Amino acid sequence: MNELLRALPTYTAAHLQLSLAALAIALAASLPLGIWASRRPRAGPGLLALAGALQTIPSLALLAFMVPVLAALGGWSARALGVAVPAIGVVPALLALSLYGTLPILQNVVAGLAGVDPAAREAARAMGMTARQQLWQVELPLALPVMIAGLRTAAVWVVGTATLATPVGAPSLGHFIFSGLQTRDYAAVSLGCLGAAALALALDRVIRGLERAAARRRRGPAVAALGALLVLAGAAALPWGAARSGAGAASPVVIGAKTFTEQYVLAELLAGWLARETGAPARVLGSLGSTVLFDALRAGEIDLYVDYTGTLWATVLEQTGPPPGREALIAELRRVLAEEHGVTLVAALGFENAYALAMRRAQAQALGVATIGALARHAPELVLGADYEFLARPEWRALEAAYGLAFRAQRSMDPSLLYQAAASGQVDVISAFSTDGRIAALDLVVLRDERGVIPPYDAVVLAGPRLARERPERLEALARLSGAIDADSMRRMNAAVDEEGRTPRAVAHAWLDAHPAP
Amino acid sequence: MIELERVTRRYGDVLAVHELSLRVERGELVALVGGSGSGKTTTLKMVNRLVEPSAGVVRVGGRDVRSLPAHELRRRIGYCFQQIGLFPHLTVAGNVAVVPRLLGWDPARVRAKVAELLDLLELPGELAERTPDALSGGQQQRVGIARALAGEPEVLLMDEPFGALDPITRDTLQQRFQEVRQTLGITTLFVTHDMAEAVLLADRIAVLEAGRLLQVGTPRDLLRAPADPAVARLVATPRRQAAAVDALLAGPAA
């Protein structure tokens, strides 16, 4: 808990900074747009509809969508201007949040201007104001309270949605929520939620003060509320911790991690290994989306991460046929990744974390099911629980086709909740990861893929082009991890986090202590 | 001096004002009277180009109103209307100061003018820093008139300025306005549908019907020699009403 509280100011400041910057951009965009829309009775409704449509895109999808868009844009701007737009981190989060915050402000700018008393408008014209003077001296001041109300709505939305910025690599209070959900640290989840809620409430209060002052046309309270807003912005800009500034160390190695326990442990393990073997400083950027990582590695935004051969086979090589064997797949990937993407496959760690289908041991025995082929006969009476990614992946389609699987129902849910859902009987069969410590702990069994449809999932360390070019000695040090971790060790480390509540960092360091330098 | 020369305003197929010619001499008040839809307000608004004529020429002080940008023209023409349209985010003083500030007067001159007009319209000085919502309807229209006069305009346009006031307030304000107007000697075009008001305030009355001018003349001219039965009916209304009121109040002879 202490560790959590120590990290709180850093993430809160980052969260606030991100939110305020997004609000500022949203405000700067929607003010002229709103004025433009309110002068054009035909185009105006179209613009509002477009902004409304943006709003209906789920926020997480919008955030994730920014990554490939920016990656493409970054590639173009790097060629055309010599400057690459960063595809992960604060920029995509800021863009998506700004888009998100635009609608409520835009709507209220339009509504506020439409609500200006026609008599005041006529008087402004008749007194001899130019169109610009009418806008600035009469219409905008009269629309101000309504516009500020829109800002207030936007502030609450943006602060809430900013928690979702974590998977695209922008630090925010979402860090506590995402990592806490994965490692089942509910104190962390609560801290993240409460922190975001408190921040939203505080901002809401301050802006409401501003709104009231504007409605009553009182200068004193308005100045006080603006002051409070500035203090908040100033506080957010203070250097609260190392996470934001990257400690100013000479370009640390940035290690990415997906959103599950094993990835946190392995990222910490790689960081610890690099520090010990080469003295290189390393920084872990956790809770990134799975597809975000490979793009980020290619773009040089991160230097290292661990991926799985089967995943790369399907998503990067875009193969759908049956994969070659374990070794052949590693060799093929090493060649294609280097030739086509400039990515180095540094080491295969020595274990597989395959997608697998698992069910309760007692039910499997009662039905006499040990293989997926046997499962297919009972599937029409059973309910499948799967993580969101699994059902969209080619492996699942291959399994469905090869075994003729048709379940009574399919439910998708967060991977961290799947095992408990199976153990408690809410679903019968789940998509599982073969190294997950909870399979043994909750008395589940993995069903055998007797036709070899699921490709091998060897954990492999991938390095980006910058590290390979500038620091080959670090890659050599990492290559010594080849075959160093077997499936049992990995399962135990995962269980230590998920079941015993230890931190990924502590578990990784325990492994390092037990494996001194060769 | 205001001149309208064969001025026409068309809205699609509808002729709101048809070939209307009218002169308001320097220092004179001409009342435009007529029923709803007779074209009074459209005629008035063509003087300061809130409405642009479809044909014809409008001159103020001898100059075609199209010879300068609309906003510059309007700063030289006072405008006062029934809805008043005070700016709710400005104080009383701020409202009165709008046109002088647009004209770029120095602050001392603006302050002096505001004080002079509040005094002229018998508004207590302590109201200067209040916002309009703290004022009664009559006080608001006094501010509206002060605002219209603040830029020292050549001419004044008034569109039923007292139409929304209660009878006693209206009576007081009509009298006060008449005194102010005669002191300043300002040329005024005044729209009203209230014949009594027209008779009380106007030097001459112009009667409109369906966008055409039926007759222009002093109240007495119109009463004595109406050009049209409609004019006769209209001009007779105040006296008929007054007579009826007198008769009712006197009651049957005991």
Image (cartoon, rainbow, N blue to C red):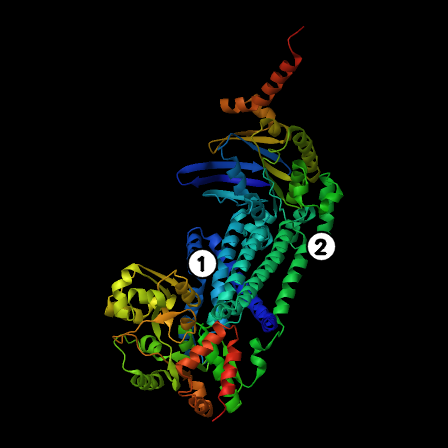
- The circle on residue A55 is 1
A285 or A132: nearer the viewer: A285
Identified by mark 1, the residue type is: Gln
Instruction: Give the CA separation, mark 2 to mark 1.
Output: 49 Å
Residue farthest along the right direction in this orientation: B125
Residue farthest along the top direction in this orientation: B254
Element marked by disc 1? helix
The residue that label 2 is drawn on is: B107
| Chain that bears disc 2 | B
Q: Which of the 4 quarters of the picture holds residue A443?
A: bottom left
Quarter of the picture containing the N terminus of chain A is bottom right
CA neighbours of label 2 inside 10 A, class few (<14), some (14 to 19), many (20+): few
Residue A3 pos. (x, y %): 59, 74
Residue A378 pos. (x, y %): 27, 63
Residue A318 pos. (x, y %): 30, 75
Element marked by disc 2? helix
Identified by mark 2, the residue type is: Pro
- Residue located 31% across and 64% down the image: A366
Image height check: is B43 above or below A125?
above
Counting labels gives 2
